[in-house]
Image (cartoon, grey):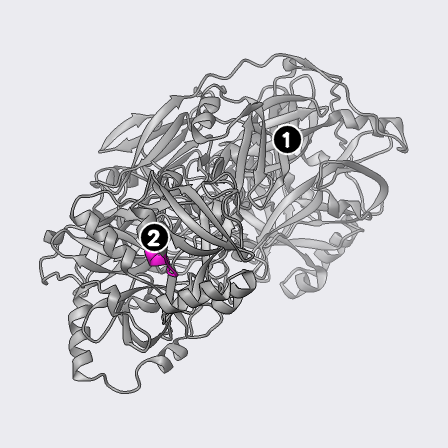
Amino acid sequence: MNGPSTVAARSKRKEPPHVSDGRHPKHHRANGDLSAGDNTPDIPEDDMEGEFEEFDESRLQALLPTGPDTAEWQATIESVVRNVVSIRFCQTCSFDTDPALTSEATGFVVDAERGYILTNRHVVGSGPFWGYCIFDNHEEVDAYPVYRDPVHDFGILKFDPKAIKYMPVAALPLRPDHAKVGVEIRVVGNDAGEKLSILSGVISRLDRNAPEYGDGYSDFNTCYYQASAAASGGSSGSPVVNIDGYAVALQAGGRADGASTDYFLPLDRPLRALKCLQEGKPITRGDIQCQFLLKPFDECRRLGLGAEWEAQMRKKFPKETNMLVAEIVLPEGPSHQKIEEGDVLVKVNGEMLTQFIRLDDILDSSVGGTVKLLLLRGGEEVEVEIEVGDLHKITPDRFVSVSGGSFHNLSYQQARLYGVACKGVFVCEAGGSFRFDNSENGWLVQTVDHKKTPDLDAFIEVLKNIPDKARVVVTYKHLRDLHTLHTTIMYIDRHWSKQMKLAVRNDVTGLWDFSNLADALPAVPPVPRKAAFIQLEHTSHPAVADLVRSFVHVNCSMPVKLDGFPKNRKWGMGLVVDADKGLVAISRALVPYDLCDISITIADSIVVEGKVVFLHPLQNYAIIQYDPKLVDAPVLSARLSSEQITQGASTYFIGYNRIGRIVHAATTVTEIFAVTIPANSGAPRYRAVNVDAITVDTSLSGQCGSGVLVAQDGSVQALWLTYLGERSPTTHRDEEYHLGLATPTMLPVVSQIQQGIVPKLRMLSVEFRAIQMSQARLMGVSEEWIHKVSLANTAHHQLFMVTKRTFERKEQEGGALLEGDILLTLNGQMITRISELDVMYSHDVLDAVIVRDCKELTLQVPTVAADDVETDRAISFCGAIIHRPHHAVRQQISKLFSEVYVSARTRGSPSYQYGLAPTNFITHVNGKPTPDLESFLAAVVKIPDNTYFRLRAMTFDSVPWVVTMKKNEHYFPTMEWRKDASEECGWRRLTYEGGKVIQGEVTDGVSTAADESTEMDVDGGLSNE
């Protein structure tokens, strides 16, 4: 039966290599793996089923010709390989069915004089494309798309033939008429990432339905050829040639289950498109929004094909065994209510036909007119007249980017895939303000701010009139479930990216032209609002119940991915520590840095803007602030206890669970211990060190990432916080820990902030770990000191050993602590509790007694200032986010190779394509040293657009390497963010274009939305979620 194949099909893009240890390899293949700092939307593996496959090289070798080719085949292949090119390309942003990606494929020259190359549509893509071709003699030339078919899997690239100087460029003739069953063929292309591979096979079928590749792009309304050639990733777009040296088909897909079956696209439609381009004619494409499938006569008989019609068909087409049967009819399309699923197509315009090729011919020549179809429906003849639509008009060629998201009209591809009407506003990049709760793709926006958005033009007009920082109601549906209407409230960000950009495809230049549709309207000044808090029932004491008035809901969104932080949006509960000044304490796992937007919701009613006041470098909390004049509600300042909570003590747990509901229970403290969160080697990011953590005996503690531990008098003994942990090597997800932080350690900082003083903390640039007395004795601690420990801390007999030194940019004078040192006292006080280290925060120098190499030493240990650990400047260059190595990097490394550190990168960008990975240090640009951001910026700004340059880099593991990259200012302009208190949002944006500095943003450039990826490769620029 010739139905759609039930086995998973695989596309010919090669699979990216996988990172096994969480850290990026020194060199990346063109389609490198992701990492937790990339500013690119995440593509779940399930969504890519059938797209990629690991190819078994042994299987490939086994399928190659076992003996030498004949002299005739050798001569043919020698002639063909000169026409075949390897294509390295980026699809620079998500569009329609295609995610942003970098990959490689194959193409072949079909017009040497004009410079046309034929390849697959899934290579050219439906959105912005940037790439180049490498010929057999390793000459390289830029290529750009001049045509991509709306449906069929072919596209045409253009290059400058004059740029190829060292070999004659010839064209491979297209001969679709030479494709026959039994014909021996060779697939010549860039197979499995190799420069050139020649695979043999025999055409076994000419009447296969187009393979389905899952949720992404799939061809339809065409037949495919089938052969056993075992081509794999990278061979997309390879010519399928016969012994005469003619291209008889185009390599397009294959089975993903290990079988050596490949699928080839017939060349009839590519040949027509090529001739139209050569003659300067438009490539008309007609369609009636109905998908047909080839089905054999026996199945057609069951659908109503009578004996008389079957006899006529078999007489007219003696070699055919199939007829065309309607499979999907799109609602509201030209065929709606005229064709029904299961109808057998007999005639078009009075002509009997059984093949897609002839149907395409008729439809393509009838755009704007009508066709008459004779159908068999349950044995009855039905004749209908249908208008032929323009396929190009229902294939989006533009998109708009606003508030971190990108949108276009729903494509025919997506409509056909889900069997829905071809209309609506499709979210192709769900980032920034338009990052929905569910991370999957396929959303259609129904209304914004209570206004309908039936198409992109209506959507644009609605968004133009929404001011910055407005909160609006958005309704949306998913293509898989149009029965369910989702409703959400969205915060419209128009200050990090002020422009509303329209990108329009230009098939002359091959680029997408950007224009600014509208600048942001200024934010509406907030007004005071009134609210009341809920009543907490069944608590042990009224003072505990009153704490409900001290909790606020905090949303934090980060438009740029910095410091290795893996998410772009976090939420949780904060504790109001000063209602009069609007001060709120919250976890640094929720507010990691101050290049962010913070919304604070009070009493589940009043939403006010917040800003970062203080970020603690070690203890996992931040202080944020809102304007209390905007809040007319009985907000209560939480009383922070000055008494240390102890193990075994009774306490009351109040927390907020994963859905934001308050839960509470009486409990006891089970343990107080020094936090030991593992470092994340693949993407160093903030983690708490040198601080005590508290656990309690209630199952609620594991369910709640925010809360407090409260004494009976209502004083807060500890904050319950989320601690960001390491990435799991098995699940590739970021671990989070829920632990308590005792409030006495916060009091000095909170007190200074209340007085209007910015805390100037000092700290020891080392990380400590608790050791037991058995270990301490072996490391040289005397029995006298061990006895003192047992008297000083009856609950825990422990001392602290230096496990890691933080690299400091300036040499420390005096007695610096070294790895392996055991700390006995600081300023005369024995240190047996991690909280006793807090003495370091207020002293420039500490008198320390330590044990080193079994010897007791007295040192003057200097502390370092903690006010220089936060990132205050970031650069986006070629899709990579670059800044000074942040504190977490210096905590994990023993030497800084330069002050130019790659923190994240965007999928589909030059940095992604050429392998510049997060955790790399850039030391030189074109041979010139770049020790700091200033010298790096000065060097890269001078590089002309679309030219190669050299970067010398050092991996986190001290391995030097050199990468050559090509600059692309059109899609990835060089931008800089600088912390600037005079700016409303606290940061200033600069753009460098053509060697000039421009304040703010420029019109060019894709929206590099940061994703909530599980790895550190981002989506890495503005709006990186």
Q: Is residue 255 magenta?
A: no
Tell me the element at label 1.
strand
Circle 1 crowding by C-alpha within 10 Å: few under 14, some 14–19, many from 20: many
Residue 353 painted magenta: yes
State the residue at coordinates (75%, 21%).
636
| Residue of label 2 | 360
Q: Amino acid at mark 2?
A: Asp
Give how far across and how far down residue 332 sits, in percent.
Answer: 50, 38
Query: In the rendered structure, which disc, 1 or 2, sits on the residue that comes first in sequence?
Result: 2
Among the 4 quarters of the image, the one containing residue 556: top right
User: Which residues, given as a range, are shown in magenta?
Assistant: 352-359
> Percent x, y for residue 478?
57, 42
Three-letter amino acid code of the residue under disc 1: Val
Q: Residue reaching furthest front?
A: 308
Q: Which mark is residue 554?
A: 1
User: Taking the image as drawn, is residue 905 in sight?
Assistant: yes
Q: Residue at x 64, y 22 (%)?
A: 607
Asked whether 954 or 127 is in front, the reply is: 127
Question: Is 260 situated above or below 361?
Answer: below
Residue 922 visible in the shown view: no
CA gap, disc 1 and disc 2: 56 Å
Badge nearest the viewer, 1 or 2: 2
